[in-house]
Amino acid sequence: MTTFIDPKSVPQRKLYTGDTMPGIGMGTFGSDRFTPEQVSAAVAGAIESGYRLFDCAAVYGNEDQIGKVFREAFDKGTVKREELFITTKVWNNMHGAGDVLVSCAKSLKDLQLDYIDLFFVHWPFANYHAPGCSVDSRNPDSRPFNVEKFIQTWRQCERLVEAGLVKHIGMSNMTIAKLEAVLPLCKIRPVAIEMELHPCFQQPELFDYCLTHEIQPIGFCPIGSPTRPDRDKTPDDIADIQVPELVEIAKAHNIHPAVVCLKWAVQRGQVPIPFSVHEIEYVSNLKCTTEDPLSDKEMEILKSIDKNNRLIKGQVFLWEGAKDWEDLWDLDGSITK
Ligand SMILES: NC(=O)c1ccc[n+]([C@@H]2O[C@H](COP(=O)([O-])OP(=O)(O)OC[C@H]3O[C@@H](n4cnc5c(N)ncnc54)[C@H](OP(=O)(O)O)[C@@H]3O)[C@@H](O)[C@H]2O)c1
């Protein structure tokens, strides 16, 4: 018997449009480790458990299986469409004229939906890499970020809103420099930015920038993505759930360190989207947002363990001639060309 957590007891976030979204959701990227069947089975279990937000993407290669799960849940009456908040994303090879609309239409068909709640531009450039390629490979067609090209992609997202196919639009893997360049050009502003956020990578400047601009931060890899693909691992990476201060807090609350990461995320104000195929984990990930909050002192301790440790560095999206992965993230405050 699945544990049910009343979705009304889960924190909600208000978007600048006045709409709300759940304060925590479930990720659906199988990280090249978990099959579409495992991921979609977890989505089915998660709906039964009370999850109402699901973070999907065309590139995760499992939207058709997840769509079957949504259809069954609606048909069985487990949940109504309007009770779910479903995101998806256009992948880097579909930024061209008309392609965003094609990508959205495919996601709608696969997910068996007639609208998407929040549609993201997954990465801010059209740099494609072959699935499974090595971190050193460079696509000769890859280019640095270009404002005009990004806005062409964004205009297509705006058309999806105008056509009623998408309720809200958002960006992902952005920097303050890129946002400064594109926000003034948006006819429809992003309601949310999806970004890497976990205790050892808090991105305080970008996080505050989003809040100041009424953009909801959505945090991916909220547990530090212990099962991320090998191509996203480097020897210097820090495992959030092994950091002694965090482990101490977990012991004090008698919970797994992963759950501490999620309590911290929700209390800080971002929307974490943890992934797990294990029922015991995904249930505790949702339940933890409804009980036993961290104290102000614990929140302060967790704030202090930020190590600026980016895990998803994006090497495979680099263009020929780029120095290293830091070029993707505009570390000197201006857009790297
Ligand atoms: N926009 C983007 O570019 C982008 C990039 C990356 C990810 N994302 C999104 O973010 C989601 C989450 O990221 P992620 O999957 O990389 O990382 P994550 O949620 O930080 O880590 C997932 C792993 O943490 C472990 N875990 C989860 N709950 C746990 C618990 N209660 N106790 C112990 N271990 C637990 C599981 O490993 P075990 O199976 O070993 O237990 C699971 O595979 C993705 O699914 C995707 O939707 C978006």
Image: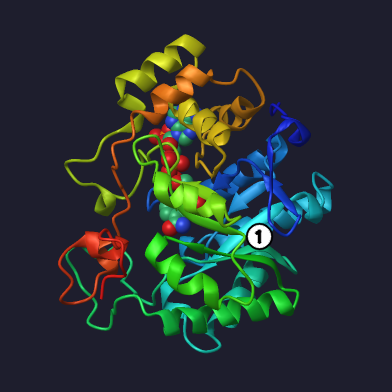
Q: Position of residue 15 (x, y in %)?
A: 68, 53
Q: Which residue is mark 1?
A: 67
- Residue at (53% x, 60% y) in the render: 62
The residue closer to the viewer here, 3 or 329, is 329
Label 1 secondary element:
helix
Q: Residues within 10 Å of mark 1 (few under 14, many from 20)?
A: many
- The quarter of the image holding the N terminus is top right
Is 191 positioned to the left or the right of 112 in the image?
Answer: left
Is 9 positioned to the left or the right of 26 in the image?
Answer: right
Q: Is residue 9 above or below residue 67?
A: above
Amino acid type at circle 1 is Gly
- The quarter of the image holding the C terminus is bottom left
Q: Position of residue 181 (x, y in %)?
A: 44, 73
- Residue at (51% x, 64% y) in the render: 171
Q: Position of residue 99 (x, y in %)?
A: 53, 84
Residue 335 visible? yes
- Image-quarter location of ligand 1: top left
The residue closer to the viewer here, 46 or 268, is 268
The residue closer to the viewer here, 39 or 92, is 92
Q: Position of residue 201 (x, y in %)?
A: 35, 41
